């Protein structure tokens, strides 16, 4: 399998190369040159394990690895998940199921890909006989950072660098990042928002002067964000697994249409659903659920992407994003590299672009999009707890609320991206409880109120002392990297 850039100006590369590069040298994102098709034998798949389905899907993307190698990566990556099947399907009502993707070590869906990416990357380094250390640049609005730091913790031949916004992330997300103990970690709070950090990362990844200095020190950039193809491929797996499980449970007949709703920020998770559909999975409408930063809702309605607007800090911080990177991959699929290159140039220069009517019509045929503000998010948390005795985190609550906007005859899958304990303060307040200033106390309060145990993965998190206390302006990140890497 070869990979091409969405902007059409970079050479075709192998899967191993695409994994290591992270971003294509022309600033575009890697996509499969020819889309693989899955063989859906539901009689067999309905009883298959997550690892077995993962092996089948990932072998199509990364044929440089043997099936046995991929099975080993997946087995080891998900070894410490707190749910034996790795992801859980939770029935909400007769037509709706939640897909819980937060049973990994940092309690967010990011663990699904970021527990695996270190295995894929280190194997790619070995197979291509590269001697360099990978410097993995990562921008986060809260969840990716913790998951990347955990996944790459002390992984040989890697150094993991995380930039997070100093304002907006939850106390628990901050604690996960600032207490990362790996010797290969560098974590910086930035005085800017996620978009500023992501823009800086993308610029650094293709900074030729820096790349040359790195080469002289036997260092090489990669990324742990969903711009990395390894993230996307790993996320396709859970849609296939979820479908198989719904068939197994009798919630779906093989071949029946399943609609999917995804709380969306950087567009990686919903793009993975679109790719699964392209590979032949019988998915229907894909619903893009946004919070008060509803740039995507407006775009799907009008065809105008308008990033130049107020950035809002909301109760669903991981989705506080105005420039959704992976939308570029979707647009490439619908309109091709020349159009994408032009739109991305407009976005960089004018913070806006407008797609043509034909592309907009194609988008609207496949996607719904709507948003929900923080007040509706709270109401949804309360309603679902009262009616279903089920605790939603704020991001999932956004998706549950938005899903209500789109009545459909088809079965619904709503992606549940984080544990409610990651956002205990917000969840307690939504439930009418008084949240304390002390985040550890809130974990216990939420546990008592909901009669659910605090997840073991975070039980002693607040006993750890933060070791990463650096705070920098975006303009100083390059100089800091030069100093940190000894360039
Ligand atoms: N929601 C993310 C933002 C980064 O997205 P990614 O999927 O590209 O890593 C976060 O929580 O950091």
Image: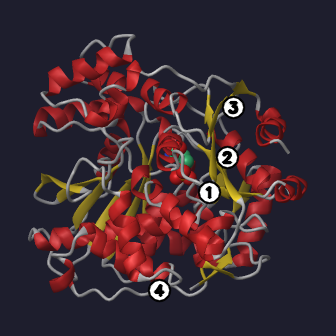
Q: Secondary structure at mark 4?
A: loop
The answer to whether mark 3 and mark 1 are in CB contact below 8 A is no
What residue is disc 1 on?
325
Q: Secondary structure at mark 1?
A: loop
Query: How many residues crowd around disc 2 within 10 Å: few (fewer than 14), some, or many (20 or more)?
Result: many
Q: Mark 2 CB in 8 Å range of ligand 1? A: yes
What residue is disc 3 on?
192
Q: In terms of sequence position, does the residue under pointer 3 or pointer 2 come before the other?
A: 3
140 displayed left or right of 257: right
The percent coordinates of residue 56 (x first, y second) are: 35, 80
Mark 3 and mark 2: span between their CA atoms?
10 Å
Q: Secondary structure at mark 2?
A: helix
> What residue lies at 67% left-to-right and 58% top-to-bottom?
222
The answer to whether mark 2 and mark 4 are in CB contact below 8 A is no
- Asked whether residue 294 appears in the rendered view, the answer is no
Residue 36 badge: 4
The answer to whether mark 1 and mark 2 are in CB contact below 8 A is yes
């Amino acid at each position: 399998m070869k990979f091409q850039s969405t902007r059409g100006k970079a050479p075709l590369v192998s899967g191993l190369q695409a994994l290591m590069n992270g971003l294509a040298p022309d600033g575009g994102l890697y996509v499969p040159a020819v889309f693989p098709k899955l063989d859906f034998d539901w009689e067999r798949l309905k009883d298959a394990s997550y690892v077995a389905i993962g092996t089948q899907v990932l072998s199509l993307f990364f044929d440089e690895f043997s099936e046995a190698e991929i099975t080993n990566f997946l087995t080891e990556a998900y070894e410490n998940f707190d749910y034996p099947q790795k992801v859980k399907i939770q029935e909400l009502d007769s037509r709706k199921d939640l897909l819980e993707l937060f049973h990994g070590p940092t309690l967010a869906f990011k663990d699904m890909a970021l527990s695996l990416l270190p295995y894929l990357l280190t194997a790619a380094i070995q197979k291509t006989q590269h001697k360099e250390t990978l410097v993995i640049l990562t921008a986060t609005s809260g969840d990716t950072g913790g998951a990347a730091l955990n996944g790459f913790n002390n992984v040989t031949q890697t150094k993991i660098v995380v930039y997070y916004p100093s304002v907006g992330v939850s106390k628990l997300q901050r604690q996960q990042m600032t207490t990362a103990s790996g010797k290969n970690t560098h974590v910086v709070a930035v005085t800017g928002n996620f978009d500023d950090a992501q823009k800086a990362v993308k610029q650094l990844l293709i900074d030729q002067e820096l790349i040359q200095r790195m080469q002289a020190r036997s260092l090489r950039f990669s990324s742990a964000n969903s711009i990395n193809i390894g993230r996307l491929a790993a996320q396709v797996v859970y849609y296939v697994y979820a479908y198989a499980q719904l068939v197994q449970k009798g919630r779906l007949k093989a071949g029946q249409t399943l609609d999917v709703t995804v709380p969306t920020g950087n567009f990686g998770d919903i793009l993975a659903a679109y790719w699964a559909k392209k590979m032949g999975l019988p998915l229907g409408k894909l619903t893009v659920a946004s919070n008060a930063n509803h740039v995507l809702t407006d775009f799907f309605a009008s065809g105008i992407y308008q990033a130049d607007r107020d950035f809002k800090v909301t109760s669903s911080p991981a989705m506080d994003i105005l420039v959704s990177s992976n939308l570029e991959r979707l647009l490439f699929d619908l309109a091709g590299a020349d159009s994408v290159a032009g739109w991305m140039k407009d976005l960089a220069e004018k913070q806006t672009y407008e797609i043509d009517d034909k592309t907009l019509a194609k988008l609207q045929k496949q996607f719904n999009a709507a948003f929900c503000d923080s007040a509706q998010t709270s109401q949804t948390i309360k309603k679902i707890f009262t009616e279903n005795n089920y605790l939603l985190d704020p991001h999932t609550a956004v998706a549950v609320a938005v899903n209500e906007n789109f009545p459909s005859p088809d079965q619904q899958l709503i992606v549940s991206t984080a544990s409610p304990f990651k956002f205990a303060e917000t969840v307690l307040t939504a439930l009418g409880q008084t949240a304390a200033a002390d985040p550890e106390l809130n974990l216990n309060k939420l546990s008592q109120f909901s009669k659910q145990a605090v997840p073991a993965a975070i039980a002693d998190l607040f006993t750890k002392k933060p070791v990463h206390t650096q705070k920098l302006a975006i303009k100083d990140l390059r100089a800091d990297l030069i100093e940190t890497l000894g360039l």
